[in-house]
Structures are given as structure tokens and as C-alpha cells.
Amino acid sequence: MTLSNSSRLAFLFPGQGSQAVGMGKDLYESSRAARAVFQEVDDALDLSLSSIMFDGPAEVLTRTENAQPAIAAVSMAAWKAVEEVGDSPQAPDLVAGHSLGEYSALAVAGVLSISDTARLVSRRGRFMQGACDERPGGMAAIIGIDDVTAREICLETGAYISNVNTPEQIIISGAHMTLARAIDLASARGARKAIPLSVAGAFHSGLMEPAQHELNDLIESIYFSDPSMPIVGNVQARALTTAAEIKEELQMQLTSCVQWNRTMGFMLQSGVKRYVELGPGRVLNGLMRRIDRSARVTSIGDYKDVCAYAAA
């Protein structure tokens, strides 16, 4: 498989934390294709998730079991709106998503239907919340140390590296006392910032094992198609080209580090310089600026963005 053409395009999908009340409403009101996605998600979940997205309240939207399918719904709606508005828009050569976003990538790559994606993501959110309740913990952003130092800190304290987002932005996690010790040690080892995050638990760590076990059983029960384009996975940071490879990846994802810096490095080394971030917020755009400022990233979260992209 040759991935060296400089004209190659990648679609990127954001993860949990990008949610905000009102997200997706403009897409719903302006795009028939996007509206159909929101309706399909609502029907699949037997829940008016779109009402929670558009009108809140925020504390309901931010619950893990709601935030995850809501973010995926906006990402899939933005994708469908781009297809609807664009004059034969270029299909992506590669797709990737940050944690939860990997599931949005499955839908775009034809691995799962929109309905199956919504149901799977909703159950994933419930499993994760259950693990958070069973094994309480938290996460912290560590800025300004490399991953070698971060690994040493985690080995000394029992914390986990959960995300390597850029060369200097690393997210660690663990039980609350463990995380507090790791934050103190990171500051002592020269981190510019060590910031506790407002999250429900220690995602992408060993504390998520109960959720991973439940999710693995569910994944095994669902039919996955081979992807129509490679998906660059979070865990292995390589191109996944078969349903079996994708299932294997997802069955490690909740308890493994999100290797986002390596994922983007794979894409960059494959000649990809054009990226479209589909979904709420501009988090992945900001991360790419810290990885490679020469890469072109377009963020599409509302209908104005869709039209601007189609006109470009």
C-alpha cells in the first residue's frame, strides 16, 4: 500500500471533552443529510439525544454515556453535510480519531453503520462510567516533559500514561492519591504545568479494565466490515485495513495509551499534509500545530464551516 502522495487527505475526529451545549444545532437546521444523522442516532438510542445536545442542560450532556454518542453524532453529521454540499468532494485516504473519535472514523470508513456506531459508543460510555464508579480516579495534563520522564514518574508512583498528544503534552491518570503524587513529582522533575483535568475517571488506564472486558464482549457480538480506507489506530499508531485488526485495536483501547503524537507522525510520514477535523471544537487542530505547523488543518463543526470547505 503506497501512502506517499502529497495530495493525500486525512479526516480526524475529536474525542470526549469537545462537547458543548448547542453543538450540531446549526448542522441540524441547515443540512438535510446532517438532520438525517441526528434522527438516526436518536432512533438507534431510543432517546432524544439531539435535544440534549442542542438545549442541554450541560450537566446532562457531559455525562459520559451522553457525551460520547453526542460528539460522535456531530462528527458523523458534519461528514454527511460535507458530502451533501461538496461537488464530488475528495474522499479521505486515511482516517483517525482521538479515543472516542476512532468510532466516528469507523462509520466514515464503512466499518459500521451510523446506527451501530451510535449504539456501540453509547454502551462504551456506560461501561466507562461504571468503571469510574467502581475504580475512582482522575487525569492530569503534564506540559513540558518528554515521554521518557513521564514514564519514569508513572513507574515510581503507579500512575499511567493515558495520552501522548504532542511531544510535550502528556496526559497521566490513576487513582486520586496516586495521581496527586505523580503531579507533585512531575512538577519537581521540571514540568512547566501539571494540571488536574475535570473528567469522570482515569480513562485509558488499568482502572478501565472492567469497562474493557464488557466492551470486548460487545465488540465480538457485532459484525464489522473491512474499512474502505485505512484507519490509523490509537494504540498501535499504524494503518488498520481489516475488520479483525480494528477489533483487536478497540479491544485494547480503553486500557492503553492514546498514541496521538505517533498517529499524526505516521500520517505525516505517509505524505499527508491536508487534514479535516470533523466534529465539535478545534482540539485536534491545536494539537497538530504543536506537532507540525506546516500541516494544513481545516476544522468543520457547523454549517458555515461546511460551506467554506466546499467553496475552497
Image (cartoon, helix red, strand yellow):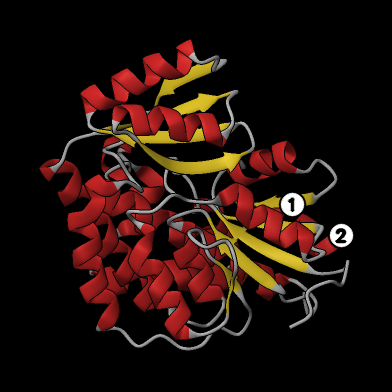
SS of the residue at dot 1? strand
Q: Nearer the viewer, residue 64 or 248?
A: 248
**Residue 38 seen anywhere in this rendered image of the structure:** yes
Residue 272 image position (x, y, % from top left): 79, 62
Q: What residue sits right under mark 1 in the picture?
A: 298
**In the picture provided, is 41 more to the left or to the right than 126?**
right
Residue 61 image position (x, y, % from top left): 32, 44
Q: At 31% across and 70% down in the image, what residue appears?
A: 120
Q: What residue sits right under mark 2 in the picture?
A: 312
Question: Considering only order in the chain, which callout, 1 or 2, is on the residue closer to the N terminus?
Answer: 1
Q: Nearer the viewer, residue 272 or 82?
A: 272
Pointer 2 with pointer 1, Cβ within 8 A: yes
Residue 98 image position (x, y, % from top left): 51, 53
Q: Quadrant of the C terminus?
A: bottom right
Q: At 77% across and 66% down in the image, what residue appears?
A: 270
Residue 291 image position (x, y, % from top left): 71, 41
Amino acid type, callout 2: Ala
User: How many marks are shown on the rendered structure?
Assistant: 2
Q: Residue 66, relative to residue 117: is it above or below?
A: above
Q: In the displayed image of the protein, which residue is found farthest to the top?
A: 188
Q: Nearer the viewer, residue 116 or 44?
A: 116
Amino acid type, callout 1: Thr
**Residue 303 seen anywhere in this rendered image of the structure:** no
- Tell me how far mark 2 sits from mark 1, CA to CA: 11 Å
| Pointer 2 local density, CA inside 10 Å: few below 14, some 14–19, many at least 20 | few
> In the image, which is nearer the foreground, mark 2 or mark 1?
1
**In the picture provided, is 255 more to the left or to the right than 246?**
left
Q: Nearer the viewer, residue 235 or 148?
A: 148
SS of the residue at dot 2? loop
Q: Residue 129, relative to residue 227: is it above or below?
A: above
Question: Quadrant of the rendered structure where residue 217 is?
Answer: bottom left
